[in-house]
Image (cartoon, helix red, strand yellow):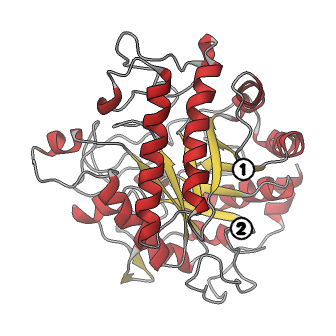
Amino acid sequence: MKLLFYILGLSFLSGGCQKKSNSPDAEEPAGYYTHNEFAMGVDLSYVNQVEDHGGVYRDSGQVRDPFKILESHGANIVRLRLWHNPQWVRDLYGDPGKTLYSGYDDVEKSVRRAKQSGMAVNLNFHYSDFWADPGHQDPPAAWKEIKNLDVLKDSVYNYTFRVLRKLDTQGLMPEMVQIGNETNCGMMMTGTAAGFPGLNGCSGQWANFGAVLNSGIKAVRDAAAQSQVKPKIALHVADPKNLEWWFQQVTTSGGVTDFDVIGFSYYYNWHTEIAFGALPQLITKLKNSYKKEVMILETAYPWTTQGADSYGNILGGGQPLSGFPFTKEGQLGYMMALTEAVKSAGGSGIMYWEPAWITSAMKDSWGSGSSWENAAFFDFQGNLLPVVQYMQKK
C-alpha cells in the first residue's frame, strides 16, 4: 500500500521545529500548520476535571500546562463538548458545589485556555445534559416537556445564539461549531416523553431533524454576523460507512445545506466496514460531491494494552491494525499514516479524542480514573509521548 511505503520511508521527526505564534490566525512557521491549512485538533474537554483531581502533565520532565504543551508540538485547534445543564455531575461526586464539568462555565474556562495558548476552538454542542452518541441522544431536562416542533426549534436557536454571543462578548467566539455529536439517526430522540417532536431520521423523520439542525445553524450564522470571528459549521456522524447515505438524506430529505464541514468519527476497532486503505477515496468523493471540507472529528490509537488504574480501558482489547502495534512507535506510525491518508485525499483535518485523559481521581458515570489513558498522548506518569510528532508538517 502507498501509505505503508510512505511510513516506511519516513524518519521520525524530532522536536526541532520553530515555535508557533500565539494567534489562531497568525502565519505559521514552516514546521506547523494553521488550523485553516489543516486542523490538527485535540479534544481537551476532560483537562479541567483531570487537573482538579490530581492529574499532572510533563514535557521533557517539566510540569506544564497541557494546552501549551500540545500547542507547542503542533496542535492548532481544541475541541470542547458542551452539555446543556449537567447537574448529574454533582450527584456523581455527592457535592452540590462541584464544578459542572462540560457545562457552560467549565467550557468557557477551556475556550479561554485554548485561545490564550494560541489555538482555535471547535465548540461541540451535544444538545443534551449527558453524552450524545449514536445510541444516546437524550434531550436536555429543560426541554423534555416540549410538544411542538416550532418551540423546540426556538429553544435550539435561542440556546445556541445565547452561548455564542456570551462567548463573543469576551473575545472567545469559537472558530468552528458542531451542531450535534455523532448524530447518526438524529438528536434528542432517546429518553423522550410522549409527544416530544420526532427527530429520528432512521425512522423517516428527516424533515423534523433537518428543521432543528437548521435552527442551530441559523443561530451560529446570526451570532457570527455580529462577530469578527465567523465559525465554520460542522455536522458529525460516527463511522465512515454512514457518511454517504447520511449526508444524502440530511441534505435532501432534511433540507440542510448551509454547513461547511463533513465530520466523522473513525476508530479502527469499531469502524471496520470501510477499510483503512479506502478512507482516501471516500474523503475525496465526499469533498467533490458536496463541495465541503471533510474532517475526522474523533479518532485515537493505543500506545499500550496496559492500564494505570482499575478503570477498564476501552481501546486496545482487539488486534492492532497491521503494521501498527500497540506501542509508542506504533501509535505515532498510525497517526502519521492516518494524517497522510486524510491530507492526500484533500481532507481538512483530524481531531484526536481525548489525548489528555490521563488517570487521576476524577470520576465519570462508569468509573474513577481513565478508560483512555492507554490511548492518550501522555504516559502513566504524565510524560509526553512521541505521538505528537505527527502534527508537524511533512
Give left or right: position of 312 versus 76.
Answer: left
Foreground: 25 or 389?
A: 25
Q: Position of residue 105 (x, y in %)?
A: 30, 59
Q: Residue tagged by mark 1?
A: 260
| Residue at 39% over, 27% down | 138
Cα distance between the residues tagged 1 and 2 = 12 Å
| Residue at 51% over, 28% down | 187
* Mark 1 crowdedness (10 Å alpha carbons): few <14, some 14-19, many ≥20: some
Q: Looking at the image, is mark 1 or mark 2 earlier in the sequence?
A: 2
Give left or right: position of 317 versus 101.
Answer: right
Of tags 1 and 2, the one toward the viewer is 1
| Residue at 51% over, 65% down | 173
Q: Which image quarter: residue 107? A: bottom left
- Let me know if residue 132 appears in the view: no
| Relative to 282, residue 12 above or below | below
| Residue at 28% over, 65% down | 51
Q: Quadrant of the C terminus?
A: bottom right
Q: Position of residue 16 (x, y in %)?
A: 65, 88
Q: Secondary structure at mark 2?
A: loop
Q: Position of residue 157 (x, y in %)?
A: 49, 41
* Mark 2 crowdedness (10 Å alpha carbons): few <14, some 14-19, many ≥20: some
Give left or right: position of 87 versus 172.
Answer: left
Foreground: 272 or 207?
A: 207
> Which amino acid, by three-letter code, is at mark 1?
Asp
Q: Residue tagged by mark 2?
A: 36
> Which amino acid, by three-letter code, is at mark 2?
Asn
| Relative to 330, residue 211 above or below | above
Q: Secondary structure at mark 1?
A: loop
- Let me know if residue 311 appears in the view: yes
| Relative to 218, residue 348 above or below | below
Give left or right: position of 53 versus 238.
Answer: left
